Image (cartoon, coloured by chain):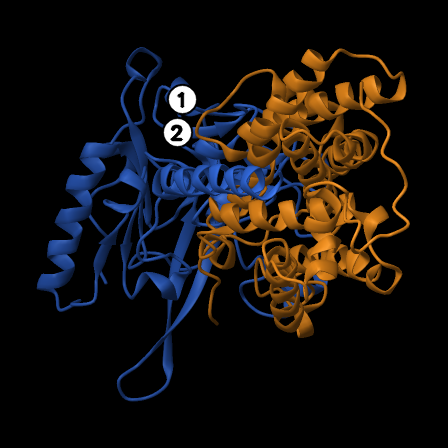
Amino acid sequence: MAKESVAPTDIRAPRGEDCERTVGFLTDATLCIGCKACQVACKQWNGLPGFPDPDRAFEGYDHTLSLSARDWRHVAFAELPLAGGGVRWSFLSDVCKHCTRAGCLDACPTTALVRTEEGGVVVRGDVCNGCAYCVASCPFGVVGRSDEDGRAHKCTLCYDRTPRGLEPACVKACPTDSILFGPLEALRGEARARLDRLHAAGGERATLWGERQAGGLHALFVLDAEPEAYGLPRDADSPSAQWLLTDAVTSALACVLAVALLFWGLH
Amino acid sequence: MAYRVGPPPPPWKPEIALDFLFSAAGAGMLLVGAVAFLRGDPFPLRVASLAAAPCLAASLAILVHDLGVPSRFWRMLAQLNPRSVMSWGAFLLNACFAVAGLCFLLRVFEVGSLAAWRALAAAACVVAPATLAYKGMLLSVTAVPFWRKGRLFGALLVADGVALGAALLVFDYVPTELVVLVPTASLARAFLMLAVLARAGEDRKVLLKRWTGAAYLLAFLLSLATLGLMFVPGPHFSIAASVLLRAALVRAPYGASAQPTQPARPEIV
């Protein structure tokens, strides 16, 4: 497939003076070649540890398997069945979605997780106490707790680069422009344009994922298959936004009922 | 290869199952004792006052131990995040521990007016069931598939905590042949929570994987059975019910039919 025409320079990263804009990622599975340059660049820029078990590097092409405290980018190697038999690969560089209704942000009891003025969600390492409730509350399995320092870690949307006018490290390293960074509205327009071109070229299964999940994500994905093939849920939202109220009401009723029954029973 | 959809199991240690057990035992005893006190029977609260605070202290200690950075536990109490069940829980568990601790001190030093005990009992009637409920919500308000499907975890753990607390509280009244029911109820509770925690994900390394389903079912049935015993009247169940409530807590003379050797009750004030 031909390389898309929009280069990262066409959607410039926010500068210090206009960083109030909401920014995000657009990742295109149809352009990804699975080189993992984004993973390496992310580790390099953020000082993340390497792979814990070098032997696993020989077990398969995907030896990190998922996002974690030490892997803030993960290139999924999805095996898609072909009509005539056999499979083909489709690669996708997964990352934190920086959700509008972020489960991790809702769940954090110490407010260690905060939203930046650019719309990203970052962990304040000096506040996090490692309760790991954000790990259980992220519907995308993004957040991980480090065994080394006991704190939660995830993608920062390169908050230490973008206000200075630099692209995130993964975007900078991507050789095929599979990953774009920029204002969210511009990325949405670009994603729809790509989708139209893919459909016109016969890519009927191509979809745009990330516009309606969790109130809208700050990481959009142009997919070449069902989202589950890449480990992405079809629908997802912050558990707190979905169930906190109903569960609180149910539990409160149970409390009242329990106390009332005890009062009735004990006399 | 097929990728996991959804979050991994949180990296909580297996000891968290004991935290669920201790908090349910402490809050359950405190609640049953408090209600009995407000209904005119001070003796259960005297027992609960000695037992609840150590249980809740153990629960708090396990929770702090499980944190990635235990020295920052206090940050949970520095502010309230109303959208976080964990944040509610930190305040509720500490409030419950504070009430239980005050009861413990008043009981040990044999001080406190009737009004003070009433105030503590009334406070316990609020914070103890809420503490039980938050533990269930802590699991159900997550993205972990098995937990989030347990929509009634909050209600279940309230009922289960009351049953366990009552079972432990009336231990002294239990006929010898039924004493085994009390540790059984406690073990069932521990198995229940171990099973629930272990089923967080389909991780092959998770403890008890092969029999979590059976353990969960057994524990759930035992919990329901112990809860049901509380409210079953009739002569046949007069002994069985004494395990939990009736013979121990209902009416005077304190389970006399089932416990002829029942010692005289000390007064609370």
x, y percent for residue A80: 35, 74
Judging from the image, mark 2 belongs to the subunit labelled: A
The chain letter corresponding to orange is: B
Residue under label 1, please give it: A116
- A88 is higher (above) or lower (below) than B102: below
x, y percent for residue B162: 63, 45
Residue under label 2, please give it: A120
The residue positioned 54% from the left and 41% from the top of the image is: A264
Identify the secondary structure beneath mark 2: loop
Q: Are marks 1 and 2 on the same chain?
A: yes
x, y percent for residue B41: 71, 32
The residue positioned 43% from the left and 48% from the top of the image is: A139
Residue A125 seen by the camera: no
Q: Residue furthest bottom?
A: A84
Judging from the image, mark 1 belongs to the subunit labelled: A
Amino acid type at image mark 2? Gly
In the rendered view, does A172 fall on the left or right side of B27? left
Question: Which numbered dot is residue B155?
Answer: none
Q: Nearer the viewer, residue B224 or A168?
A: B224
Chain A shade in the render: blue
Mark 1–mark 2 Cα distance, whole angstroms, equals: 5 Å
